[in-house]
Image (spheres, helix red, strand yellow):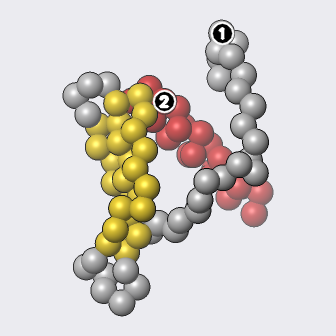
Amino acid sequence: MNSKENHLFVNPNTMLGSVYAQVVSVTVNDDGTTTLDFIYKHPRDVNEGHVVSRVTLLTSVAKDLSDVLNKTILEAERKKK
């Protein structure tokens, strides 16, 4: 967050549900948003899958998310060494 943004407290114990996904589909839309579809592949039929969650967010937020994911993964991998 930059210094101009408000800080948002999120209680991590207020999860509405949890699902597992093996695939994420990313669609950049013409209206300035990006949609992420989280897909669960059926274990007995790899050609069958179900969207278990769909999230649409501003493309600028999607870029920030991408940066945070990359930074977090790289840091976790560095700590394993």
- Residue at point 35%, 36% (across, down): 34
Answer yes or no: is residue 75 visible: no
Q: How many marks?
A: 2
Q: Amino acid at mark 1?
A: Lys
Packing grade of label 1 (10 A; few <14, some 14-19, many >=20) is few
The residue indicated by pointer 2 is 61
Q: Give the side of residue 81 with respect to residue 16, left or right.
A: right
**Residue 79 location in percent, x, y?**
77, 57
Q: Quadrant of residue 52?
A: bottom left
**Residue 75 location in percent, x, y?**
70, 49
Residue nearest the observer in this picture, 54 or 29: 54
Q: Quadrant of residue 56?
A: top left
The residue indicated by pointer 1 is 4
Answer yes or no: is residue 16 visible: yes
Say which label, 1 or 2, has the lower sequence index: 1
Quadrant (top left, top right, bottom left, bottom right) of the N terminus: top right
Q: In the rendered view, tell whether residue 4 sits above or below residue 41.
A: above
Task: Assign a secondary structure to mark 2.
Answer: helix
Task: Assign a secondary structure to mark 1.
Answer: loop
Kindly report the distance in space between the C-alpha atoms of the residues bearing marks 1 and 2: 15 Å
Residue nearest the observer in this picture, 55 or 26: 55
Quadrant (top left, top right, bottom left, bottom right) of the C terminus: bottom right
Q: Amino acid at mark 2?
A: Val
